[in-house]
Structures are given as structure tokens and as C-alpha cells.
Image (cartoon, coloured by chain):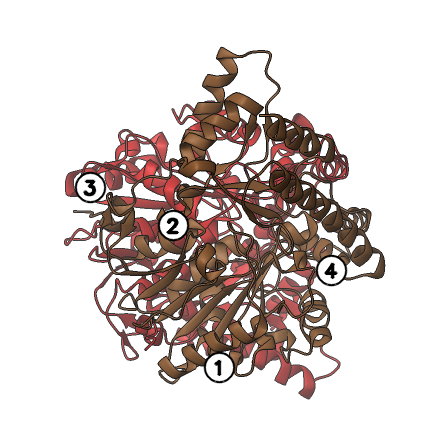
Chain colours: A red, B brown
Amino acid sequence: MTKINNNYSKLPGSYLFSTIAKKVREFESANPDAEIIRLGIGDVTKPLAPAVIEALNKAVEEMAGEETFKGYAPDLGYDFLREKIAMYDYSNRHCDISADEIFVSDGAKCDCANIQEIFSTDNTIGVCDPVYPVYVDSNVMAGRTGVYNHDTMRFDNVIYMPCNADNGFVPQLPKEAPDLIYLCFPNNPTGAVINKDELQKWVDYAKKNKSVILYDAAYEAYISEVDIPHSIYECEGAKKCAIEFRSFSKTAGFTGLRLGYTVVPKELIIEGASLHDMWARRHGTKYNGAPYIVQRAGEAIYTEAGRSQIKEQINYYMLNAKIILEGVKEAGYEAYGGVNAPYIWLKTPENMSSWEFFDYLLETANVVGTPGVGFGPEGENYYRLTAFGNRNKTIEAIRRIKEA
Amino acid sequence: MTKINNNYSKLPGSYLFSTIAKKVREFESANPDAEIIRLGIGDVTKPLAPAVIEALNKAVEEMAGEETFKGYAPDLGYDFLREKIAMYDYSNRHCDISADEIFVSDGAKCDCANIQEIFSTDNTIGVCDPVYPVYVDSNVMAGRTGVYNHDTMRFDNVIYMPCNADNGFVPQLPKEAPDLIYLCFPNNPTGAVINKDELQKWVDYAKKNKSVILYDAAYEAYISEVDIPHSIYECEGAKKCAIEFRSFSKTAGFTGLRLGYTVVPKELIIEGASLHDMWARRHGTKYNGAPYIVQRAGEAIYTEAGRSQIKEQINYYMLNAKIILEGVKEAGYEAYGGVNAPYIWLKTPENMSSWEFFDYLLETANVVGTPGVGFGPEGENYYRLTAFGNRNKTIEAIRRIKEA
């Protein structure tokens, strides 16, 4: 008799964005003339860069020709892309990562969710609070957590590391060391970053405690300040204790094209086993490579034209971020992020709950963001705005927030 | 202290294709003038159909425009594609499957490997022998099997269902019912098919024993005979006990483009839980949708032009299959498959082992296929040839095999 994976029943349901959608629909039908501006979901809006389009067109043409057609891609990615990544994202930043330590995939979300499979279900996990839900949910499904406690809004057997204004949204080193430590910088949802000295402490801590850091650097392209590490491998010894995830989604607008990669250094040996070899085995068995045309599109962002065009896109979004951050501050709000990340993390006024503030902003300014509590209990009394919108709408949203 | 997933150490290593590559390299360096013909790997060689290329070009253009750009795709697939699949692959064959029971993904390999995640690790699995290795290996990694026994070439705690000439390569119903039953028809590697009456017996057996059938129909487009079911949902009651996997890889040459789908009927309820909802949750948490441009390419195979063009490709490969099957029979071999599948399953002469025959064919005919034993012990004394090659090379390979 077939039995299901009962761990799925521990998941409380992902109601955040569906609740938002429902509230917005209700408001719209009650106020048909309201022009709602959405600064909620972290999806890009600018079209693909011309260099990327050119590469796609060329690759599609290759797929049409008998001599140039490409079938199965190498499981771990085409060398032409892995070599560009190694050079531009690592060598050029003085990180010693070789092309064959880079595993190309269809996105950082999948990799962040799948990486736990190569670890024992006995491991404990540590996550920031607030947190991108995929880290926790994928571990719940695998049975690495206890049940969900609706009062504390937390799963049993998970080490939550609070991130709040007191610690600059960078967690303290936990007393009980998690076996697997999820870190994300620049952070989603808070927009916070970690400096190199602080990150080095995490690397040292992981090495000392024989933990592995799962480092999500999906937003590194948004770092504008010097001294902020773009990769965990800028830290001494990280190759012995850290796996890094990168995405083309926010870097180059690939959310609908799907491309990312994971770095698993060969020096990362746990219990005598090479995590690099295990991840290669996982890729080879459960994955079949990213599409050739998409890998060619990815390669194009490393050309001179591509680099300059995606820089322009990022500047566009970061000017939005600046407009939002300065605007809400002028409106009297306490706000964080927005300097090295496309997210602005706003403190609700007068201890309004995240959802009260959601309703307030929807009603008075017709602006939609994301209630911070949706990312964890420490996100209560916070609200996330994203910089991925259209410039004019962003300006209009801020005008209305100021007026409200 | 981090602990690894020790189940990975049970995997004996996937040496089949690397051993083949090594042997071929050695032969090539010893015989630099030999023109080797490869009929081993199941990858397509024809370029994408014009209708597919046209759809890709149009979709790429959309990604270049501010108004038409597409970001994140719906997790479960775009409706435009799910509706075409429901109509052409199911309604038109009198199967009552609705668009929202179809989950679009980046390929059947991933889905076949990932589907086990929604089931308990306590379930027993049943697989054909010989078998596509992904079914077994993904379960090994999840801890659903015992250790690998090098003498029997089998994992403990797996129910192997022998497929051989005596049973027409269609397994008997096992005495001990597996909780999860993997079936693949048309079969890789044997090229065998199952008729509707026989498949109905499996559906009845699964319902009686409360088992779930995981039905891999990746090669259904190659079925040429009537009375052979294209979908398990042609059988009465299958919606209560079966999940079906489909691929665009062999149907339309998408091996390098990556697109497939899985059907999980809403009626499929196990222990009170909807497998449809569980798979939706798995997709939502661990996957981020297939690329928009690839889904548009998939949609194009359902246009009138697309249908006729992919039919032509399949006819091309199936004429290769006919040439191979008739050729090896004329050469005196016993051979199977090749009528409803792109694979020819050849019995080695005089009880030569699969690997002895590999060496023999490489040396005497400079032809490379796949040793049957690589797919399981029942594949010993068999050899797989694929119909995905170029026509002239296929003809030449057969000429040489006859001469050898």
C-alpha cells in the first residue's frame, strides 16, 4: 500500500502571495477606478538586454541547422559558460574557483531547494528570520524539521537566527551551531549586506564547528559599496566549508529564461566524501542540463556589450531603490536596504502590524508591497518594497505614500 | 557537525557510458583511420522543426520588448501550453485529463527522478529489468533501497520484474505488490510495447493492491501500431492509481531545449492526501517553471504545421529503425523493438556477453551501440541500437554489420 511523504503535511500552506492577491482583488472590485501600483513581487520588468537577445537569436538559428543543432547539454553545463563564470565572477574578484567547480542549472531557487538532498536528514539547519521560505520548506519536505508551531510561527528543530534593526539585520553566531547554515547576502527580504570581516567570522565559525554554509548570493550584482564581498570565497578558508548559489534572474533579467549556477569547491570534503562529486551525481541523475540557447544567452552577459547593458539595467532598478528609500524616509518612515539590494525594508509606523500597514497603504495610496511577517515572525512590523517596477510608477507610488 | 546523505555511497557508479567512451577512444587511437558510427546514445540528431524555430524567434522577440517581456512563468506551466496538451494528447485520444492536471517541466528525466519525493521513504519500488537507471538511482539516493549487490547486480529491497524474450519484454505482475511501480512503454531499452488489455491488468492490479503506477510514456510518439495505448489513462480507472510522464525530447527533438510534463490526476488520493496538490507544492517550492520561450516552442508542435513536421521527423527515425531491424535480422540476428520505438534490442550471437559483443562490433564493423547489461542483469546477452542517427550512416552501419 502506497504511503505518502507525511512531511508535506507539516507545511502550513504558502498563503502570503495568494492572500495579497485576494486582498488586492477585493479592493479593486470595491474601487474600480483606483490605479494600483504593485511594488510587491520580486520580479524584473525590463526586457532582456540586446546582447542577450542577439545571442538567443543566434543560438535558435543553430538549433535549426543539421550541422549546428545541439541535443543533450552536458549535465553540469557547457564549458563556454562555466569558463566565463569562473573568469568574470571569480578570478576577476581574486577568488580561486575553477570552471569545473561551477554547476550550471535552471536557477538558484531550484539549487537552494535541492542542495539539502546531499546531506543527511539528521542535520540541523539554521536560517535567518525573516527568511526566503524555500530554505525552510525544502527541509521540511525532506523531514529535517519538526512540526510547525502556529503560535511562534516557527518549525520545531530549526535554529532561527533573528535579524533586526538591533543587529543591522546580520544575525549573531548561534550558540548551538547548526550543521547547515543558510545565509543570503545581499538579503531578501531586508536588503541588508554583510561586510567581509563579519562574513569571515561565519566562515571561521563554520570551520570550527564543522558546519557547511549555504550562501545565496543571488543579489550580488546590486552591491554598490566597496568592502562588501560579492562572493563568500573572498573569505579565507571558505572553499572548505561553503557552497554558493548565483542567479542570472536579477543580475540580467532572466526570471523567465531560467539560469543560475552553484559553486561546490573540490576542497569541500565532509566525512571523507566530496560534496562536489555528490552534487555532480545528483545533477547527473535528477537533472538534464540547462537549455543550450539559454546557456548561450547567459554567456552573452559576459561580453563587453552585455556587461555594460546589464549594468545599465541594474542602475535603473537601483535608482528606483534610491527613489523609494529616500522617499519613504522623507515621508517619515524608518527604512533599510535599497543601497546594495533591490529591496527596501520599511518599519511600519506606530507599531502597526505588517498586515495593518498593507491595508493602510492599499487604501490610502493604492500601493501594494509585501507584509514583512510573511517572511517570518521577526518580519512583523516590517514591510518590503521592491525596486523592480517601472520608473514612473515608482515615482508615483512614492508621491502617494508621502501624501498618505 | 555536518553529515552527508550516506545513501549516495550505495550507488555503484554510473560507468556505462564512460566505459563506452573510454573503449571507443582507445580503439580510435589504435585505429586512427577507422570511421566509427555511433548508434549508442539516445539523443536526437535532426534540427528543430521550422514551426518550433518560428515560435522561438517570435518568443525571443517578445522578451526584447518592454510591453511583451515575460518574467517568472507560472510554476505549473502556462495555460496556453497546458490546454494544448490536454486537447491534443488526451481529449483527442478520449482520455479525460484536464489542463490543470498537467504540470509542465524541463523534462521527463527530472520528473521521473523527483516524483518519488512526494512518497514515504518506507515504500517499496518495483522496476523492470532491464531498466532506465534514473528510476532506481533516484530511489537509492532517497534511501528507499538497500545496498547494491555486485554479484546479482541488484539493490536489496527493490522488486525487479524481469523482461525477456519469454514474456515479450512485458513483466509479469509481481507476487509481492510494490508500493510504487515504474513502467515505461514504449520501453527504453528494449523497444517493447504493452497492449491495452495487458496495461489494464496493471491498472487493476495497482488499484487492488493500493499501489501507484509511475508510467513513463516518453516514447509514445513512436507508436505505429493501432491497439497500443499512448497513455495509461486509456485504461479504465487509471486516474485513481497512475501518474504519467511525457517528454518533448524524442517527440519533437527537444533534448537540448528541455521540456516535458507530468500528469497527476485530481482523483489520485492516497491516505486521504491529493497527490496532485502535493506535486503542485513540490513544484512551487523546488522549481520555478520552464522558460517562456521554450513553452512557446512546445505549443508550436500542436499547430497544424508543427504536427506535420514532427511527424516527418519521427518517420525519418522510424525508417532508420526499420533499416536497422530488418538489416540485423537479415544478418542472422534475433532482434526486437524498432516498430513502436526508436530502439532495437538485439540478442548477441552464440551467448556472447554484451561487452564481448560491444568489442566485436567495434572491431569488425566500427559500430558503437550500448551493451544491454548496462541496463540490468536481464539485459546481459543483449545490445541496444538507436534509430536517432543520420540515415546514410545508419545504412552504412548495417552494411558493415552484415559484412562482419
Q: In terms of sequence position, does the residue under pointer 2 or pointer 1 come before the other?
A: 1
Labels 2 and 1 in the same subunit = yes
Label 3 amino acid?
Tyr
Residue at 21 percent across and 37 percent down: it is A204
Q: Which residue is mark 2?
A: B378
Mark 4 and mark 1 on one chain: yes
**Which residue is denoted by mark 3 in the rendering?**
A205
Report crowding for label 3: few under 14, some 14 to 19, many 20 or more residues within 10 A (C-alpha): some
- Label 3 sits on a secondary structure element that is helix
Residue type, mark 2 in image:
Glu
How packed mark 2 is, by other alpha carbons closer than 10 Å (few <14, some 14-19, many 20 or more), is many
SS type, badge 1:
helix
Q: Quadrant of residue B286?
A: bottom left
Amino acid type assigned to the residue bearing label 4 in the image: Glu
Structural crowding at the residue carrying mark 1, measured as other residues with C-alpha within 10 Å and reported as few (<14), some (14–19) or many (≥20): many
Q: Mark 1: which amino acid?
A: Lys
